[in-house]
Image (spheres, rainbow, N blue to C red):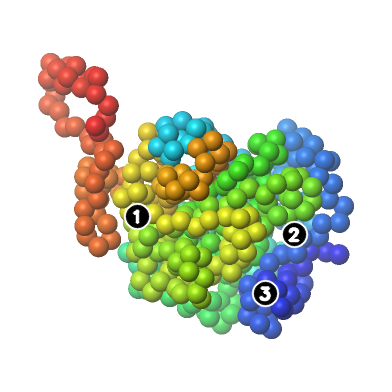
Amino acid sequence: MPSELVCFEQNCRTRFPITEVIYNCAWCGGLLEVDLASAGIDAAALKRTWRERRMCNTIADQSGVWRYREMLPFAGHVHLAVSLREGNTPLLDAPLAARYGGLDRLVFKHQGFNPTGSFKDNGMTCGVTQAIRLGMKRVACVSTGNTSASMAAYASAAGLEPIVFIPHGNISYGKLAQALEYGARTLQVEANFDQILALVRNLAERIGIYLLNSINPFRIEGQKTIGIEMLEQRDWNPPDWIVLPGGNLGNTSAFGKALRELREFGFIEKLPRLAVIQAEGAAPFYDFVRTRSGFRPVTNPETLATAIRIGDPVSWPKALREVSESNGVVEKVSEQEIADAKAQIGRCGIGCEPASAATLAGIRKLTEQGVIQRKADVVAVLTGNLLKDPDYIYRYHTGQLKAPGGEPLESKFGNSPIVVPNDADAIARLLSDTQNSEPGT
Ligand code: F0G
């Protein structure tokens, strides 16, 4: 049977052809997911094939997404793939961050090494390839910044017209600059992410644009390869925990689906537990999982980690299933905790954007609570590159960072630049005074 779209709602499960332009179930309005054509998947053989492909120079084999094409719903269409050599992101050991997080060892899967600097590229290569397969000419997304940067790049690379909708005044300049430079028509809407998403879902059908938000199941399929690549890099040894920041919850859905499929097809035996970390001011999923009393969106989400400033995450039903199936947890962290964790990740020589640092802040909290054990094998996913939001960094290190409510945050690990005269003696004196002290202490 070929891959199909299927309604995620367990009491509906209506099926649709893979080439239908549809974002929600036509019967019940539920989310859609891909039911992958899995006949003939031979885990042992594919483990070898995927490794061999790393030695090959074809585009599809060089891409850290399309290399795993047997796990994607594009059989017979891989030649259409729009690739910027995404994926291939490293696992980085971070002893300092491990100590800070209360662990013996911590490894980061750094998605900031992607072509547009975030994990969105894994999904976007598939989303834009699906747009090509469908013959669409215009693509659009609503974004807190990274999706728009990624979509702009892939759409332009494919010769499609990208249209980006972003919340006015609430995305970092690094991300806005990317959308402009990659040639997207960029509309700054005077509303928050959730309001704009509702607006654009309505608009997409009216004016015939293909929507590339993470409700698009092809985005989720591509994002699965982050988990697949991670497992391959670990020689198929699942960690105890995978820790992710949670915003719209597409990534949680993608990781969960990837891991379940890998188990179902015989690549791994054990499911890692998922830990999803939200920012305190935008934590509807945390509240829901803790109380289980109906999903209540946060109407005015606030966090300096603007990537996850989302109060009504569309993918929460899928994320709930993945957290439950993996025996996972959801935690929330404060602005101060994110800022300090971020500085620690920087000190490892690694760095990331604020939303990504929620992972380490969450790990620290979860080890303190005894939920994650000190000896546990933990991989945290850093979703975006440090350069995405330099303004935040400068403010933190110079003691000027303020929480959304205006209260100043402490620069516990601040490292302010020092202005010096053009005078060798004065500089030598200064450096000999400070040679034994750590920066920022
Ligand atoms: N980290 C970063 C850097 C992000 O950009 C996002 C989401 C997330 C984490 C959360 O991932 O939504 O799958 O739970 N950014 C979206 C955007 C919403 O528009 O770029 P999620």
Asked if residue 86 shows in the view, the reply is no
> Callout 2: helix, strand or loop?
loop
Three-letter code for the amino acid on which mark 2 is drawn: Pro
Q: Residue at x 70, y 55 (%)?
A: 260
Three-letter code for the amino acid on which mark 1 is drawn: Ser
Three-letter code for the amino acid on which mark 3 is drawn: Glu
Depth check, front residue: 441 or 130: 441
Depth check, front residue: 373 or 394: 373
Pointer 3 with pointer 2, Cβ within 8 A: no
**Position of 16 relative to 105 (above/below):** below
Q: Marks 1 and 2, Cα distance to the nearest angstrom?
A: 39 Å
Percent position of residue 201, x then y: 54, 76
Q: Nearer the viewer, mark 3 or mark 2?
A: 3
**Position of 229 relative to 435 (above/below):** below
Which residue was labeled with disc 1? 334
How many marks can you see? 3
| Residue 180 sits in quarter | bottom left
Q: Residue at x 68, y 71 (%)?
A: 8
Asked if residue 331 shows in the view, the reply is yes
State left or right for residue 406 relative to residue 244.
left
Q: Marks 3 and 1, Cα distance to the nearest angstrom?
A: 33 Å
| Disc marking residue 9 | 3
Q: Earlier in the sequence, mark 1 or mark 2?
A: 2
Which residue was labeled with disc 2? 73
**Position of 378 relative to 8 (above/below):** above
Q: Earlier in the sequence, mark 3 or mark 2?
A: 3
| Residue reaching furthest to the front | 370
